[in-house]
Image: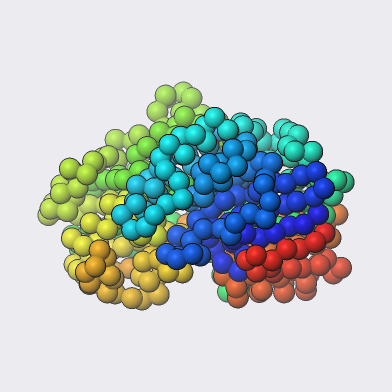
Amino acid sequence: MNITFQGGAQEVGRSCVFVESKDTKLVLDAGVHLGASDENRYPLPLPDTPDAVILTHAHLDHSGHAPALIKRYKCPIYATPVTQDMTELLVFDYLRLSRAHEESPYEAEDVQAMRSHAVDVRFRVPLDVSNAQMILYRSGHLLGSAMVWLEIDGHTVLYTGDVNARHTRTLHQADSTLPTETVIIESTYGDPNDRLPNLKKTEKEFALAVKNTLKRQGKVIIPAFAAGRAQQAMLSIEAYMRSGFLPEVPVYIDGMIRKMNEIYKLYWLYLRPEIRRQIRYTKRSPWESEMFHEVTSSERDEFINTKQPAIVITTSGMVQGGPVIRYLKELGDDERNLICLTGYMVKGTRGRQLQEGERVLEIDGEKVEINAKVHHFEFSAHADQAGLMRILSEIEGLKRVIVVHGEKEKAFAFSKRVQELKEGVETFVPRVGETIEI
């Protein structure tokens, strides 16, 4: 078996793995690199025609190039139903935003065409895919997100995609899986210094920062991934307002978050039991709370011009496009305001620039000065090094670990940790374009 890394190796973005044996050719994920604007934005061309594409989840760094592959190869695409619906929504929005800056390898009709090639997959139900047996396990990262377990020619492989080792307000942590010989695992937070704080502690620090901003009559701008982080932030704010810790000020929901909340309600069976019960018995999701005010593009002036303290949760999470751009231009220079970053910021994005202390951003050809306070809160749904090791420790029969989806130094740091704690287990940190033969 050959495993070739078309993207997502020693980097975060454009995840794409080509798995090939005598009778099987599978693509695991097909993403874009949101921090790149050159030839490194998309995965390398595939070495052969694939029998199928398998998506772990809908975030663009794992799904954004899928329409181009389906357009070219007309092969089936396997994913959970929620991943399919989310991917379509996210990719349409990505296509709309990217058209202003560069050519895309696919058009809107290619995104729509994925429907005719899609195969619904349920968790923990074995499925034959191109002479291989596949089982999807919950990864705990995003609604409908999966780890891909494969048995090919007698060999077992687990591709984690993005994986979470702790419970969140919306999802349980990753499942345990069948015994596996080869694990391809992410390393976004693979460095020992990336230890994630307790999620309850993070939420309390987040609520305190929001409270202090509202007290000084400021506005809170929360750029968030429309899928996952936005819903987490909404539930946290609602809980702290209901408890009385936060004052009940207007909370505006802008951008694609509105449509994504509808998908969360539609696929309520994927959520944690307490949210399932609420939706089942009240016919309303927690994201339909009266505390939230959904705004359209024509209503953004209401938030920008109000003299009262207020909160907006908006796309995009890495500050690359979407409504957040206007909020930064209009409100970023006011030192009373607060910008809350809530997840991993890829190198090359404006979110990463803000996280690293830059306070003059170039947006649409102009310099935008940021005097607002900027805080980064780890709401991330990735496992840290300890969580990744815990996931590996639960896997029986492990022989080799291939580390991907992490900046170079983090990937090597995690590989070193595996070598220290897993005697007799081989480790690899491949480069983009490299093939590992099993």
Residue drawn at (21%, 69%), measured in percent from left and top? 366
| Viewer-nearest residue: 370 or 207 | 370
Left/right of residue 144 with respect to residue 296 in the rendered view: right
Residue drawn at (56%, 67%), measured in percent from left and top? 11
| Viewer-nearest residue: 338 or 325 | 325
Residue 119 point in image, percent of width and height:
61, 32
Instruction: Residue 190: tell me if it is visible.
Output: no
Residue 224 point in image, percent of width and height:
39, 53
Instruction: Residue 105: tell me if it is visible.
Output: yes
Q: Would you place residue 104 above or below residue 88 in this image?
A: below
Residue drawn at (31%, 62%), measured in percent from left and top? 339
Residue drawn at (62%, 59%), measured in percent from left and top? 6
Residue 227 point in image, percent of width and height:
45, 46
Quarter placement of the C terminus: bottom right
Quadrant of res 270: top right
Residue 104 point in image, percent of width and height:
42, 52
